[in-house]
Every structure is written in structure tokens, then in C-alpha cells.
Image (tube, rainbow, N blue to C red):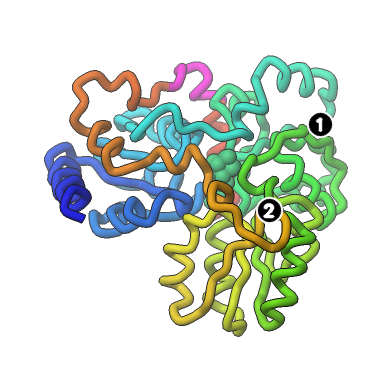
Amino acid sequence: DVEKAQYKARIKQLLIDQNAVLVAHYYTDPEIQALAEETGGCVSDSLEMARFGRDHPAKTLIVAGVKFMGETAKILSPEKTILMPTLEATCSLDLGCPIEQFNEFCDAHPDHTVVVYANTSAAVKARADWVVTSSIALEIVEHLDSQDKKIIWAPDRHLGSYINTQTGADMLLWQGECIVHDEFQAKALRELKKQHPTAAILVHPESPASVVELADAVGSTSQLIKAAQTMPNDTFIVATDRGIFYKMQQAAPGKTLLEAPTGGNGATCKSCAHCPWMAMNGLQAIEASLVDSDKTNHEIFVDEELRIKALIPLTRMLDFAK
Ligand code: 13P
Ligand code: SF4
């Protein structure tokens, strides 16, 4: 509509004027992803967002995603101004892993290699030996397991147990979860599959094990998009945030994409399967991040001592992923 078009036009101009680039996650709303594409920014998974932000020459990055993504950008590019549409966009995994308790957990197991998911605070990353995202987690744990390392894994228990079943690695799991993926229901998914017998089931490994067991492909957001693009099925049932449908449909035109059920009876619940924090990245908030003279609710800062410590495990991941 007209109002949205006006917002978009203003944001496009502001990005140019301020030498800024928009970096968006696949879970943001379709119009935000489209805007990132139209303005030469990027739409991607958390690993690629980190790489793109680090390598892009812009002076300012607008990170449309959740707070840990902005912090990762700042850790990698301290010389850049990192703005977010709102700093209130957090993540249940980050919230569920406070540094004080995490330190106690690590202190109790000093012989373990500490592997943390990117969905954590800068302080938790600073305590880690490795940071991983879902697209590289399996390979990194395989690598550590081949060296007989004992591993502390935090914070997502579902992703941790999935990796554990795949690798057989010696892993102690922190008991965190993503409130979005934790909602997918295996029973209702089996029912939906009966109604669509030719469909392939695509599952993000932050989902419960009972859902992962039903999957034809398990992977990060970028890996699931690739699966929809390359698998021959005409229909896909997708267990991850519905924001992914924008890119997945582009990658697999003509294919039918169905949301995996989050409630009983095979029904899809409207308020579920979409991260409430990702949803905060609206056009108005993006414009505000560029025009507000007071950046208190937008600009990311990371304590320099923490930043230097967190940079080590993050760089280790990026070098491994090359
Ligand atoms: P990926 O895009 O790395 O798969 O991450 C998923 C996620 O939950 C980000 O919030
Ligand atoms: Fe965190 Fe889940 Fe939202 Fe991703 S979808 S940001 S893991 S709460």
C-alpha cells in the first residue's frame, strides 16, 4: 500500500545518504527481505549474515534480525556502526543462557571444550572455545569428536541432541530451547503427511527430536532452502519459522510449501511458527534506526574486553567454514 511504499522509498534514500546496508535474516517479514534484496543488502542465515556484514564496505550495517546477530556484527566489525530496528528483538536461547549460570556450568567441567550456538550473548561467546551456527554445527562437532574432545554444548538442547545422535560425540547439553521450533508437533505432522503423501518434510534441528525423526531433510535455514530447490518432491512441509517461505518459494517456484503444524489436529496456529522478536523488524522500526538522533534503542555496543575474547571463537568458526 501507499504508506509502505513511502517507507520503503525513504529507507532506500537514507541507506544511500548514510552509507548503510541492510542485512536481513530469512525469518524477517517478506517485505523486509525484499527491501534488503532491492537495496544491495543481503538476506541469509546467521552464518552468512556475519560474513556479509564483516566483508561489506559500508560504514553502517542495519541488522534486521535479533540482538545476537547485531552483536556478532559488532564483534567482527568494531569500526562499523551497527544499528538494529530495535534492541528489544532478542531470542529465547540467548535469554535462557545467562552468563553467571553458564560460567558455573563451564567451571564444573573444566576438561570440556565449550561450543556455543551463535544465538547467545557476547559474554557467553567470550567464554566459548567455538561458536557455531546451525549450518556448520555438525561439521565442527564431528571435527572435535575426531580429536576425542569432551564437549559442553549450549544453549539449544534440541539442536544439541540432534548433533549428538548424528555424531555420537561426548556432549553435555545446556537445557535451552527456541520458543518457535519447540512448538512443532510430531503427531499433527504425521497426520498432515498422510494428507500429502508425496510431500517431503523439511525440519530445522531446533525442533524436538520427535519432529526431527519425521524429516526427509534436516538443516539450517539455508540448507532447508537448498533442499526445497533440489529435492524432486512437488510439496514440502516445513518445520521452521514461516518467514523462510519468501526465499524458499523463490528457490522452488511452482512447488507447494506447507507450514508444519504447531498445534493439535494438524491445524496450523496463526501466532506460532513466527518468531515474535524477528517480527519486530518492521519498516517503521528500520526507518527509525536511520533517522532517530538518539540511537539508544538501536545502536549495538559490545564491551571491548568481551569483544576481543568473543572474536576468537567466532573467527575460529568463520575460518573453519571457509
Ligand atoms: P540459521 O539461519 O543459522 O539456521 O538460524 C536459525 C535461527 O533460529 C536464527 O534465529
Ligand atoms: Fe531465537 Fe527461535 Fe527466534 Fe531464532 S526463531 S531468534 S532461535 S527465538
Q: How crowded is mark 2: few (under 14 residues within 10 Å), some or many (20 or more)?
A: some
Give the overall secondary structure of the magenta segment.
helix
Q: In this view, does 299 lie to the left or right of 316?
A: left
Residue found 79% across the figure and 60% down from its top: 187
**Tally of marks:** 2
Depth check, front residue: 27 or 263: 263
SS class, disc 2: loop
In percent of width and height, residue 101 lies at 73, 18
Residue 12 can be seen in this image: no
Q: Which of marks 1 and 2 is in front?
A: 2
In percent of width and height, residue 248 lies at 48, 67
SS class, disc 1: loop
User: Mark 1 CB in 8 Å range of ligand 2?
Assistant: no
Q: What residue type is labelled 1?
A: His
Measured in 3D between alpha carbons, the distance from the residue under mark 1 to the one under mark 2, in whole angstroms, is: 38 Å
User: Mark 2 CB in 8 Å range of ligand 2?
Assistant: no
Residue found 14% across the figure and 44% down from its top: 10
Label ID, residue 263: 2
Label ID, residue 201: none
In this view, 262 is above or below 191: above
Q: Give the range drawn in magenta.
A: 302-309
Q: Which amino acid does label 2 sit on?
A: Gly
Depth check, front residue: 275 or 104: 275
Residue 228 can be seen in this image: yes
Residue found 69% across the figure and 46% down from its top: 182
Q: Is residue 64 left or right of residue 258?
A: left
Give the quarter the ligand 2 occupies. top right
Please report contact status of discs 1 and 2: CB closer than 8 Å, yes or no: no
Query: Mark 1 highlights which residue?
Result: 112
